[in-house]
Amino acid sequence: MKTLLFPFAFLYGFIVWIRNRMFDHGLLRSHEYKIPIIGVGNITVGGTGKTPHVEYLVKLLYKTHRVTVISRGYKRQTKGLVEATELSTGKQIGDEPKQMKQKFPESSVIVSASRTLAIQKIMAGQVGNNPEVIILDDAFQHRYVKPGLSILLMDFNRPIYEDSMLPLGRLRESASEKSRADIVIVTKSPVDLKPIDRRIISKNLNLFPYQTLLFSYLQYGELCPMFDSLGTLTLDECKTNEFSVLLLTGIGSPAPLKSYIADFFTEVLGLHYADHYRYGEKDIAKIKSMYEKIPSSNKIIVTTEKDAVRLRDVKNLEEKALPLFYIPIEIAFLDNSADEFDKKIKAFVHTNRRHDLLNR
């Protein structure tokens, strides 16, 4: 199979290489804007943890700065530019943008396939919240906009220097394009990552002196009820009272969450759907049937934060009387390097403040 796919991977890689060189030499134009723009993205197809890292940035900045997030709105069912409201559905703006708008209603979230168009409308005051900083979600390959600060994410479990170009591997572009990043974050790292392993990764990445290498890991939160009527319940309470759980997921890699919650439940049953799966009435009936077959009297349904966003789009879900809880995730940095990261972000935003705001 690898032999058959190699010519396609070579052709794809060559086309991407030509495109990047055209941007490098000005044959295709990258636009720069007089406002701090932070780009977050990756080189590989698949989850590297972009959403929690973007949310980390928003959380870091939104109390002191007006923040606008621009996303393409993956798998949304609308076209063109859409500005999110608290009533927007996942179908209208995409799951991740809806999740961010729910978490940070004070911030503006805009979905648009063209980041250039979105920024032009923002700068003209037609959309957005007259922001002081713009965050581009999943925009490493969107070179028509040149961010002032570029953050590249790499999954610890799938290092880019061991991967191959699509369709042979999962690389969207050559690993050498990492040179465009100002900060490289190795995501989903083990909390107990050994110093020798960090040195191996650093050596293999072979970053330039101007680039900063950091390591982050996923941190699971406490159970959150999807409906107020459910009340509160902690993972420790589930462990003490010997709860069983139906783990409901529609994400690319449910294994880490399943491994995590296994420590708190006597029995874990899984019901897994494809990534970004859109739930309907038949799915809810199947979920309810599977839940009711669990013999334990102490039992709940646990899902991911992203799945909770999609489940809320199902009409009259609360009336189904399902004990649905979700587990939020956020990122943390190894070696107390959060301070270093936070200072770099804040210094960049302060130094590159929007000119028209400075002159008021």
Image: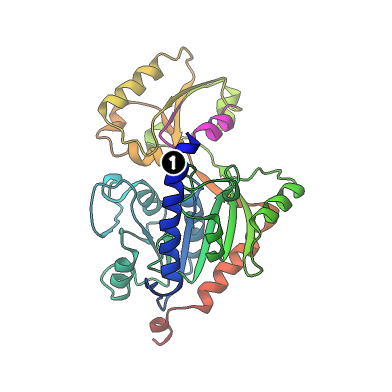
Whether residue 253 appears in magenta in the rendering, the answer is yes
Looking at the image, can residue 86 be seen? yes
| Image quadrant containing the C terminus | bottom left
Q: Nearer the viewer, residue 119 or 14?
A: 14
Q: Is residue 224 above or below residue 261?
A: below
Q: Is residue 175 above or below residue 227?
A: below
Q: Residue at x 59, y 25 (%)?
A: 239
Is disc 1 placed on a helix, strand or loop?
A: helix
Provide residue 261's location: percent of width, then percent of height: 56, 30
> What is the span of residues highlighted in magenta in the rendered image?
247-262
Percent of width and height locating residue 67: 42, 66
Question: Which residue lies under the disc numbered 1?
Answer: 305
Residue that sits furthest to the bottom in the current view = 359
Query: Does the segment drawn in magenta span residue 116?
Result: no
Query: Which quadrant would residue 33 be assigned to in this image?
Result: bottom left
Which residue is at a point 45% across and 67% down the rendered structure image?
21
Locate residue 311, reporting x and y percent. 33, 36
In the picture, measured across the screen, residue 156 lies left or right of residue 245, that is right
